[in-house]
Image: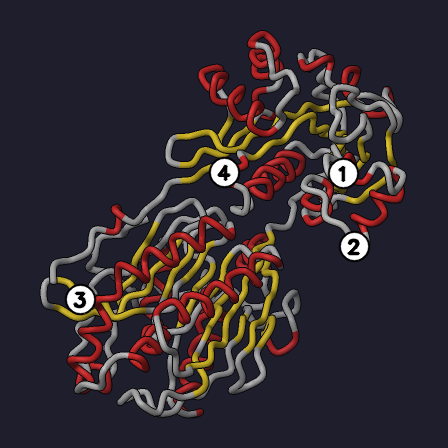
Amino acid sequence: MPGIDLATFEKRIHVRPLTRDDYEQVVRLQESCFPGMKPWQRDQFESQIAVFPEGQICVEYEGRVVASSSSLILDFALYGDFHNWQEVADDGYIRNHNPEGTTLYGIEIMVDPEFRGMKLARRLYDARKQLAQRRNLMRIVLGGRIPGYAAHKDEMTARQYVEKVVNKSLVDPVLTTQISNGFVLKRLIRSYLRADMESLGYATLLEWTNLDYQPDVHKVFVPARSVRICVVQYQMREIRSFEEFARQCEYFVDVASDYKSDFILFPELFTLQLLSFLPAQRPGLAVRELAGYTPRYLELFTGLALKHDINIIGGSHFTLEDGHLYNASYLFRRNGGIGKQYKLHVTPNERRWWGVEPGKTVEVFETDRGPISIQICYDIEFPEVSRIAVERGAQIVFVPFCTDERYAYLRVRYCAQARCIENHIYVAIAGTVGNLPAVENIDIQYAQSGIFTPSDIPFTRDAIASECTPNIETVIFDDVDLELLKRHRQTGSVLNWNDRRKDLYQVVARDRPKV
């Protein structure tokens, strides 16, 4: 079986600034999102880009603009809570943009109806939050539409409608999304935009507060760089089809996305679950048949990463390339890109039962939350791999593992914690539990998955950010601070990375770095 070209499965999605050349696409987007309302005139659109290009952004999917937002910076005290869209947006020209203001004001956000459900609005709101943090702005304020109100106008007031949306007894296509993205309802504004017949002219005044805002410009301020990790402790159980496997995987990805995780980590070889519905064969032949599911596996997780706006470390999966069998872990980025890390150190069991061959390259993957490394199970037990990865910039190491009993598990755990101390990094590990009686050589499993930190005062007690209850199916979440790693490497109680005796020893990689 020839090697699979990963590029055929990649689907490119990214957030970028709008340009003047996007005008026609933005107008088509407005016409789809706001039928009956007048779209931007070209001079309005070009004025926005000329005045504040940083505030005009879009989501592009496969070369097509599928979502966009517009904003400006204001001294909000000049407008007050009870303003209207025309005055705060300068009728769409934003010539009132004030770079010295402290409030980022959103005047429009829209998502193509064809692409709703892919959390594109979250991408735009996250980009606005990053802009506010980057510009040291105090807050983001929105005048939000309530387009679902028209259908309820005869049975309740606008205030009653908004209260029901906030307490979740009703769903509004705009307000519900804004609240789920961290915005707080402050006021209900009358006559905000008279042309908005779906909202009957009403708008909600919403606010997101930048906790990193520093009003004293003379102070040096370094914000936290928080990354949220979800770890899946996955139960191996008999299934009847690939579709059943896909439903289980999407359930966990959906949960992680709902909790706004940046990464979700699945365990090593959890795709062996697929063998439970395939005819029984000798282990070496069975896993080669399993490798035939690689295209469906890649398609599944690429789609989940895009749909749920999350980076997925898809455990590991047996991959057959030119007759050679590898244990490979795939990174499915939320922008549609795919990365691959082969297992470098093959266990005696893998070699004897399945004929697995080792990979040859230590990869470090760039992501939207910084560079990461993936080390499959046994690889974390070799400190040289982490040294090389950290030298190439990795700050988080993800370890999908599969261990049969507690002694084996503890080897993975203790080595993962050691890598944190040696390299001033975070390590997340995810393992399988349960059993597959009908699958040979996957008899018993033991796991207590977790997220580990360096062992020092600024971090959590016992250097454990979070850990699962042993041997049950569950997920854990935790936020890790990348800025804290940087400070710890310079000011920690011990400075393992800096105090290495390079005059006595060194670690040299013979592969070519790929960043």
Pointer 1 residue: 151
Q: CA distance from mark 3 to mark 2?
A: 50 Å
Residue 255 in percent (x, y) is at 57, 63
Q: Earlier in the sequence, mark 3 or mark 1?
A: 1
Disc 2 marks a residue whose amino acid type is Ser
Q: Earlier in the sequence, mark 3 or mark 2?
A: 2
Pointer 4 residue: 114
Q: Earlier in the sequence, mark 4 or mark 1?
A: 4
Q: Earlier in the sequence, mark 2 or mark 4?
A: 4
Other residues around mark 4 within 10 Å, as few (<14) / some (14–19) / many (≥20): few
Q: Nearer the viewer, mark 4 or mark 1?
A: 1
Q: Nearer the viewer, mark 4 or mark 3?
A: 4
CB-based contact (under 8 Å), mark 3 and mark 2: no
Other residues around mark 1 within 10 Å, as few (<14) / some (14–19) / many (≥20): few
Q: Which mark is residue 320?
A: 3
Other residues around mark 3 within 10 Å, as few (<14) / some (14–19) / many (≥20): many
- Name the outermost residue toward the front: 154
Q: Is residue 66 visible?
A: yes
| Helix, strand or loop for disc 1 | helix
Pointer 2 residue: 169
From the viewer's perspective, tell me whether residue 439 is left or right of residue 494.
Answer: left
| Helix, strand or loop for disc 2 | loop
Q: Residue 274 occupies which quadrant of the picture?
A: bottom left
